[in-house]
Image (tube, helix red, strand yellow):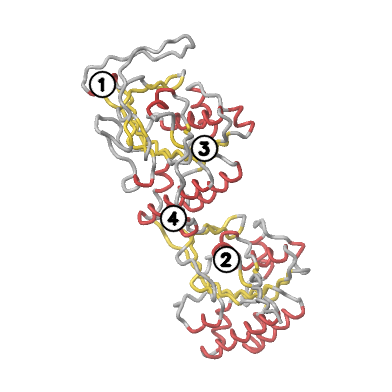
Amino acid sequence: MSHIEPTEEPVRRVVTGSSGLDALLNGGWVHGGTYMVSGAPGTGKTVLGNQLCFSHVAGGGRAVFITMLSESHERMMTHLRGMRFFRREVIGQSLHYVSAYATLKGEGLEGLSRLLYRSVREHQATVLVVDGLLAAQESAGSVLVFREFLHALGVHNALAGCTTLVLTNRQENAADPQFAMVDGVLVLEMHLEGLRSVRSLEVTKLRGEPQITGRHVFEINSGGLVVYPRLEAFVPPPREEQPAPARRLGFGVPSLDEMLSGGVPERSCSLLSGAPGSGKTLLGLHFLAEGVRRGEKGLYFGFGETRDRLLAKARGVGLTLAPALASGRLVVESRSPVECLPDALAHELLALVERHQAGRLVLDGLELLLHTMDPRRTLGFVTALLTALRTRGVTPLMLQRTPMLFGPREEGPLQGLEALIDNIVFLRYVELRSRLYRMLSIFKMSESPYESTSREFSLSSRGIDVADSSESAENILQGRHRPRATRRPSPQRKAAPRRRTPLKRGGRP
């Protein structure tokens, strides 16, 4: 007789209605399990319970939502009507609302148990949500009686194939014996960061499954309870990288591309750092426009600049981006930096990259993305974001504003993060005889040749003009510079003899 190896069947899951929460739960609640959601009033427990019910019946299931609160169901419906998951037509058909307030008050915990079992059986429910568990706990009289109630409910519904969610206001230690009666515990919280309230959740227990510890932010909006998993907890560590490809992505600015030996290597991460108004955004737009010219798709994701203002800036230096926007080869997205959630923006950015299959990315305003974040997270967050972009085949160019307006001194960008970034280009002002000059330097190109000198550059309606050599920059720094004429592009223009600076590999001389 041959031996037959048993096959492991996949675990059946019940999705929560929030894709971010499903990710934290390895795909959703386990079918037939009992789970507790704990949190203070106003943290979102009732929204989450209803979101589960409406999501479940939309997929063909049947659900019962039982309340032990004095609030009427009609009042609850009034609060839910603005949610996209709400469907009035399913109520009374595949989704039933039952009030247990009078039963608990008149018959106690035993009467409540009978009502719960009868509701699951009569409505053939595959999801049960019990809202207001604290009332049942207070009427139990003892911890032992309440534990027996939870245990019996879990056993009954597991046999009936019904996934159960119990919602409670009680804020207790996770070591409390009642938590041993359920398969998982989800804690919702709301705390202040400065003057802003931030919602977060934590999965403190998930029986028999790997668990992602720590807090994750969420918000309640028209989509319901929307969870943004902590980015660094989900992006896998970078694998051993293949040798860097020979292909380089240029800016379409000849002298700058020459300094970069043709451009930045594909899939490398670059930082363009400089003072306000030094030309960072315009160089970023040149980077995207050059990609469009070469048949590549690009994405601009920034803060503060509206789409119209950005297009006006581009036209001011001779860049016409409207055709690329109309064809979908270029996508421009602008977000407000006010009270933003970094994890929410990061997840949105990755979704946009995948949706539009962008190969070039300009992230404008890196400091605005990070300023609301706990500094202890910055290194891990940026590492995870860059790893996620690289695995999607993206070549990111990040723009960062430095506080220094002008001066001969060079200030390093993003202290502590330089090791994560492959290429760093620095823009600054230098003042000479009451006139400001723009200077461009390449601080770093990992394992790649580059020109390590500084060059003068200028902005005009004809575009960005980078000097052919470092001579003008040297004269500025020595205090003996005369303004040079801006070069006019011409097909008949002959290259003037100039002094060349040897390219350096891997660092500054």
Count residues near mark 1 (Cα–Cα under 10 Å), then give few for <14, some for 14-19, many for 20+: many
- Give x and y (percent) for residue 315: 52, 23
C-alpha span from label 2 to label 3: 32 Å
Residue 70, picture quadrant: bottom right
Residue that mark 3 sits on? 360
Residue 193, picture quadrant: bottom left
Type of the residue with mark 1: Ile
Q: Residue 468 versus residue 14: which sits nearer the camera?
A: 468
| Mark 1 or mark 2, whichever is nearer to me | 2
C-alpha span from label 1 to label 4: 47 Å
Q: Secondary structure at mark 4?
A: strand
- Residue at image position (47%, 11%) is 490
| Mark 1 or mark 3, whichever is nearer to me | 3
In the displayed structure image, the side of residue 60 where residue 500 appears, left or right: left
Type of the residue with mark 4: Arg
N-terminal label among 2 and 4: 2
Residue that mark 4 sits on? 196
C-alpha span from label 1 to label 2: 60 Å
Q: Secondary structure at mark 3?
A: strand
Q: Residue 205 versus residue 277: which sits nearer the camera?
A: 205
N-terminal label among 1 and 4: 4
Mark number for residue 476? 1
Q: Secondary structure at mark 2?
A: loop
Residue that mark 2 sits on? 26
C-alpha span from label 4 to label 3: 34 Å
N-terminal label among 1 and 3: 3
C-alpha span from label 1 to label 3: 34 Å
Residue 420 in view here: yes
| Mark 1 or mark 4, whichever is nearer to me | 1
In the displayed structure image, the side of residue 131 where residue 406 appears, left or right: left
